[in-house]
Image (cartoon, rainbow, N blue to C red):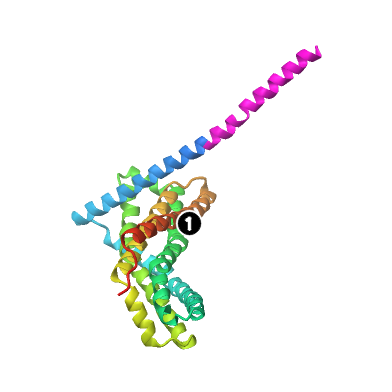
Amino acid sequence: MDQQWGLWGGEQLVDKAVRGPEPLIRSAIEFVLSGLRTFGRTIQLAIAAFRFLVVDIVKLRHPWRDTLQQGWFIVSVTAIPAVLVSVPFGVIVAVQVGSLTQQVGASSVSGAAGGLGVIRQGAPMVTALLLGGAAGSAIASDLGARTIRDEVDALRVMGIDPVRRLVAPRLAAMLALTPLLCMLIIFMGVFTGYVIAVGFQGVTPGSYLSAFAAFAKMSDLWVAIVKSIIFGIIVLIVACQRGLEATSGPRGVANAVNAAVVIGVIAAFGVNLVITQLVSMFIPTQVG
């Protein structure tokens, strides 16, 4: 009897050991599939938004009033923070680069190192952070509130596509303003680095500017602008997707805002890694 009980108990342990991981594996598979479905809906939203934007502009029926309103809103929530962030960012880069170049006796290249750091990496990433934290969160909260109040469903009932009415104008505003925001951050960051290097680190203005001109190219500026536009599109599409799919009342809107900020910024960082690798492969840094 004891032997039979031992065998039966052993079989139970074996069954538990075999069946135990199944719920965990099933949950992991469902999590991956849910993420892929969400990614697919996001891509569909992006394609639809670009299609409506191009078609409406060509047919001269794009709601420019809404685009101007959204553009002013983006400027109002990002312009002052951009200045407030780019100034200390430029100071930090200038101090760190200046300290290192002085130790190795290469103070003359501090302008090139600091300026390239701001243009290539600093300005696009600061742009992504500002758009994700300020503009993206506000867009997600606005669309989420409209969704839980059934305004989006009301648009569908009236035969108005919410993507055309709510997403396309925001996309046009984002495409127009992200290059300007990126250039503002570049100017403030480089100017701050110049002031710190010349005023506090003993670098002559001529050597700073000559080193910056020797290394910095127009291609660096274009790459930074293109990166900022891509980051702005990512942040906007993620925020719109999360806002339009918000559920469960105010709590769902809060979750949508949180997800929009986190996912948008992380996606921008990931895309930045890919773009940086491609640029370093095909557009290497050259002197002169």
Image quadrant where residue 11 sits = top right
Q: Please indicate, yes or no, whether residue 16 appears anywhere in the rendered image.
A: yes
Q: Is residue 11 magenta?
A: yes
Check the picture and name the quadrant holding the N terminus.
top right
Residue 235 in sight from this viewpoint: no
Q: Can you give x and y, in whole percent of width and height, for residue 54 in the image?
A: 24, 53
Residue at the farthest left position: 59
Residue 173: image location, x then y, percent: 32, 62
Image quarter in which the C terminus is found: bottom left
Q: Nearer the viewer, residue 75 or 270?
A: 270
Query: Residue at position x 22%, y 56% from top?
Result: 57
Q: Judge whether 210 appears above or below 1 on screen.
A: below
Disc 1 packing (10 Å; few <14; some 14–19; many ≥20): many
Q: Residue furthest right?
A: 2
Magenta range: 1-28
Magenta segment includes 214: no
Where's residue 156, x and y in %?
A: 34, 44
What SS does tag 1 mark? helix
Q: Which residue is mark 1?
A: 261
By secondary structure, the bulk of the magenta-drawn segment is best described as: helix
Question: Is 96 left, or right, of 214 in this rendering?
Answer: right
Amino acid bearing label 1: Val
Up-down relation of residue 31 to residue 277 (above or below): above
